[in-house]
Image (cartoon, rainbow, N blue to C red):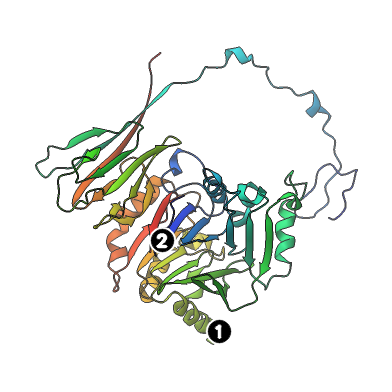
């Protein structure tokens, strides 16, 4: 149909003609008016993210991540220090932006892997497995409702 | 946006979902935005498709960048003009900056002009801002050359059949590496052995030659083997045939792309766990992964 027929209020997609119809009842239909003051206030959510560094002896280490930038590497100056020859001095960077964590390779020798894929940069999601050299880390993210 | 250093080529997935955007908690890992991928090498930025993922790319390009003194120069290659591949364009911030140079490339073999299709998407009935209001310097080019050279990047392309209305696949040659973007094609039909016609066999050879030895293949793998029979003729591939064909063509790394809107993160993770040995048992060693929004690889 190229021109709008003023008498036709309902159009059939398949091209078959439809009866003209005005739904007079529609205008009189209303929804229940809601009082804005009665709407629930903002729901406070707490985001907790942490690394679980997997150790061969089973004594895994937990590191809470917070929201500041962190450099991960073999240098003792790194925010997250990993004592392994397979890890570069400054191996990766973790940033927090728009409520998301990103991990980025810092031109490391052995590369950065997320879930087995060699990556340059990646937004992290719950249960992602990160490999930095031979060190394996699980990323965990929990959102909990604050008690009011 | 991660800036490319030295001779690395960075590939970033901004949208990996097929057909329609699927926001929500169950798709946050692999992403809910429709197709958009960037390929950055030195100063050249190539964008593949303008699905809803291009919106976040636009924000990233503009944020923190001094676009006054360093105007953006971008090259957008469209596989085709179905909604999920163009719908983000009206929300692409750099298109509203006067000094942005944006060249849009697409198939020359369509009945309607590419410029007209894109303009119509922004018709007042569908969107309040007309295409003529995009203040960037926008050139829309139906590809006429067999090979396009953008600085250090050489690009060749082929028309794809076995998708309603057709689509285009692109191959990028950079420093001896090959990256292929070949979405929206039904490989199950192309490689259907019951059709013994010479034409189909020639198309198969053409496809295999195009993706041969690719360092990265980003390709349509929308359905599982079980789902495919109900989706025959819809123009998308099942994952097993994609993996089989890519392996046969000695692809090194395969990003399974254009995820079905019904496939949640859990579904895709379970599918991987269930089939990972099968995916790896192909004769040629190939890294296979689900394309994931927010992921940057270097080739």
B242 relative to B99 in the view: left or right? left
Which image quarter is the C terminus of chain B in?
bottom left
B74 relative to B276 in the view: left or right: right
Q: Is residue B144 left or right of residue B213?
A: right
Q: Looking at the image, is B24 positioned above or below residue B225?
A: above
Residue A81 lies, with reference to residue B109, above or below; the image says: above
Instruction: Please state the horizontal and vertical placement of residue B191, each as a whole percent of the image.
Output: 47, 75
Residue A121 shown left or right of residue B280 in the figure: right
Residue B81 visible from this viewpoint: no
The residue tagged 1 is B199
Q: Is residue B127 above or below residue B103?
A: above
Residue that appears at 17% across and 54% down: A86
Residue found at x 47% / y 21%: A43
Label 1 SS: helix
**Residue at the front extreme, as displayed:** B69
Q: How many marks?
A: 2
Of the image marks 1 and 2, the number of the one nearer the N terminus: 1
Residue at (48, 61) in percent of width and height = B39
Q: Identify which residue, B295 or B45, lies in the foreground.
A: B45
| B295 and A33: which is toward the camera | B295
Which residue is nearer to you in this view: A17 or B142? B142
- Classify residue B164 by image quadrant: bottom right
Tag 1: Cα neighbours inside 10 Å, few (<14), some, or many (≥20)? few
- Counting from the top left corner in percent of width and height, residue A29 is at 76, 24
Q: Closest to the observer: B122 or B261? A: B122
> How far is disc 1 from disc 2 in space, using C-alphas?
28 Å
**Labels 1 and 2 in the same subunit:** yes
Q: Which residue is mark 2?
A: B255
Callout 1: residue from which chain? B
- Vertical arrangement, residue A21 with respect to residue B227, above or below: above
Please report, as a chain letter, where disc 2 is located.
B
Q: Secondary structure at mark 2?
A: strand
């Amino acid at each position: 149909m190229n021109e709008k027929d003023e008498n036709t209020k309902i159009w059939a997609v398949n091209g078959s003609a439809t009866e003209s119809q005005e739904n007079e009842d529609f205008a009189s239909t209303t929804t229940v008016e809601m009082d804005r003051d009665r709407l629930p206030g903002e729901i406070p959510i707490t985001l907790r993210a942490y690394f679980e560094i997997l150790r061969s002896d089973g004594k895994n280490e937990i590191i809470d991540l917070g929201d500041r930038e962190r450099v991960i590497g073999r240098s003792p100056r790194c925010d997250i220090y990993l004592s392994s020859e397979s890890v570069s001095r400054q191996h990766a960077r973790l940033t927090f932006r728009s409520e998301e964590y990103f991990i980025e390779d810092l031109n490391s020798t052995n590369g950065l892997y997320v879930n087995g894929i060699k990556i340059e940069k990646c937004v992290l999601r719950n249960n992602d497995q990160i490999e930095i050299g031979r060190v394996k880390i699980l990323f965990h993210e929990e959102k909990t409702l604050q008690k009011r | 946006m991660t800036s490319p250093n030295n001779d690395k080529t960075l590939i970033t997935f901004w949208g990996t979902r097929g057909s329609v955007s699927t926001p929500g908690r169950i798709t946050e890992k692999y992403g809910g935005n429709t197709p958009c991928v960037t390929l950055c090498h030195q100063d050249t930025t190539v964008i593949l498709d303008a699905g809803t993922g291009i919106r976040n790319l636009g924000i990233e390009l503009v944020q923190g960048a001094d676009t006054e003194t360093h105007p953006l120069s971008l090259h957008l290659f469209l596989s085709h003009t179905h909604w999920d591949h163009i719908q983000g364009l009206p929300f692409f911030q750099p298109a509203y900056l006067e000094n942005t140079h944006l060249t849009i490339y697409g198939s020359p073999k369509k009945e309607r002009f590419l410029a007209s299709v894109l303009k119509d998407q922004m018709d007042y009935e569908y969107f309040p801002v007309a295409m003529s209001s995009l203040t960037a310097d926008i050139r829309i080019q139906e590809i006429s050359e067999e090979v396009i050279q953008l600085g250090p990047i050489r690009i060749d392309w082929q028309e794809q059949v076995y998708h309603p209305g057709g689509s285009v696949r692109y191959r990028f040659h950079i420093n001896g590496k090959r990256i292929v973007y070949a979405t929206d094609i039904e490989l199950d039909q192309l490689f259907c052995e019951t059709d013994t016609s010479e034409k189909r066999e020639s198309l198969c050879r053409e496809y295999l030659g195009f993706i041969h030895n690719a360092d990265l293949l980003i390709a349509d793998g929308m359905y599982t083997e079980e789902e495919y029979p109900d989706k025959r003729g819809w123009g998308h591939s099942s994952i097993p045939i994609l993996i089989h064909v890519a392996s046969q063509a000695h692809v090194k790394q395969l990003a399974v792309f254009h995820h079905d809107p019904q496939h949640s993160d859990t579904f895709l993770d379970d599918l991987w766990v269930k089939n990972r040995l099968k995916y790896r048992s192909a004769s040629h060693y190939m890294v296979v992964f689900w394309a994931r929004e927010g992921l940057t690889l270097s080739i």
